[in-house]
Amino acid sequence: MSYFPEVPTISYEGPGSKNPFAFKHYNPDEVVEGKSMREHLRFGAAYWHVMRNGLADPFGGPTALMPWDDGSDSVENALKRTEVFFEFLEKTGIDFYCFHDRDIAPELGDLAKSNAALEKVTDQLAGLQEKSGKKLLWGTACLFTHPRYAQGAGTSPSADVFAYGAAQVKAAMDATHKLGGLGYTFWGGREGYATLLNTDMKRELDHLAALLHMAVEYKKAIGFEGQFYIEPKPKEPTTHQYDSDSAACLNFLREYDLLDHFKLNIETNHATLAGHTMQHELTVAIEAGALGSIDANQGDELIGWDTDEFPSDLYGTTHVMLKVLEMGGFTTGGLNFDAKRRRESHEPVDLFHAHVGGMDAFARGLKIAAAIRADGRLADFVKNRYASFDSGIGAKIESRSTSLEELSAHALSAGEPALESGRQEMLNNLINEFI
Ligand code: XUL
Ligand code: CO
């Protein structure tokens, strides 16, 4: 029984192929910088977008055709979706997936029943993973959809809501552990505020840190060895999200003594919303030794919200892969397509076009980034730009073995410093040589 009878298993046919159900660039076993593309890219599919996103928007209902889905909240329907999803993973050749507890199993109006449903679905997922070799990149708890979380979960003003959220985190960590998940993500769904008039920011942040510390404790208690991630996002749904960008997350983790236990899961469209480039967000994380995983998508520069589009911009994928290669590749993380089709792309085959395009865009990004690195001019330029710190007074500044007195004497004797050009246009041209 096939849920996508019109779609073949996607394979690599090379740049000359005109087949929309073929990779033009993603050739899983092709070796780049000593590793296969599959090992570099570690693609993941987001269960919430592939299986649960009906493509509704604030002005109109869902359009996505899901002939396999009876639209009910039954466990049977949830179990059926897992089979559809694994056929999708099989045909696209995507090796990993990610989920929220409530994507895979229904919320049944009673926590014990919801937990039992999650157990049943994860039993089934365990079997499907076993059969297919697919792996769970990370799991998470959905602490933002249900009305009880309207004012936050870990930062809710209600201790009972906090406890309910904590219970969901516990069950979602159990589910992730049971499925051999390589990571567990905390995205601060509604952990933020709409107005400071009703908000005690300090207490809310203390509570959020308390939740994360308890999760660290629980992780030890159950022997879960996956990596914890925090996913920055500046706004939407709340006006101000506490985990607004990489720097804010790192500061929070340091302040609350959590940095040893967390890395960041950075999403391209969230970077855009924060007024940063993705390179900026990745660089901040990498320099702190804290880049864990990536939610791969792109935003629309003409629209000010999280459009979660599939990555198609080759400059974007090139810059991401330059950073990933620079850090030495992913360990537990990967490229999770936290992306949805446009509302107009409502047919099941569009799921394939979307992911195939994203995978090819990243495969090209990888090849282009590797070529830029092999060429070496870009890295050399940056290295040379700071060469004055390699010896003499610059080396003393870097080793903190000088003083304002000595630097003043240096400046008095050296005269007016000369600056070399930053050569931005030349470097843009250099990148374009490879795109
Ligand atoms: C929301 C978002 C989430 C997280 C997981 O913008 O990116 O889907 O990735 O909760
Ligand atoms: Co995301």
Image (cartoon, rainbow, N blue to C red):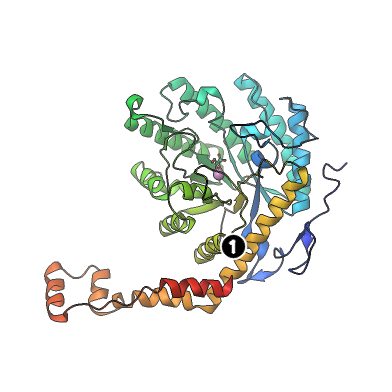
Q: Pointer 1: what residue?
A: 314
Residue at disc 1, CB closer than 8 Å to ligand 2: no
Rendered location of residue 410, percent (x, y): 15, 77
Q: Is residue 144 left or right of residue 276?
A: right
The answer to whether 233 is drawn above or below residue 150 in the figure is below
Q: Residue at x 14, y 67 (%)?
A: 404
Q: Residue at x 42, y 30 (%)?
A: 155
Q: Is residue 65 above or below residue 332?
A: above
Residue at (37, 29) in percent of width and height: 195
Relative to 352, residue 99 above or below: above
Residue 198 is left or right of residue 397, and the answer is right
Callout 1 secondary element: helix
Q: Residue at x 45, y 39 (%)?
A: 235
The quadrant holding residue 348 is: top right
Front one among 254 and 435: 435
Percent position (x, y) of residue 264?
48, 49
Numbered-mark total: 1
Which image quadrant for residue 203?
top left
Q: Is residue 95 visible?
A: no
**Vertical placement of residue 86 versus 371, above or below:** above
Residue 170, quarter of the rendered image: top right
Quadrant field for ligand 2: top right
> Residue 373, image x and y in percent?
53, 73
**Residue 256 seen anywhere in this rendered image of the structure:** yes
Measuring from the top left, give residue 89's x and y in whole percent.
74, 48
Q: Which amino acid type is marked by label 1?
A: Leu
Q: How many other residues sit within 10 Å of disc 1, few (<14), some (14-19) or many (≥20)?
A: some
Q: Quadrant of the N terminus?
A: top right
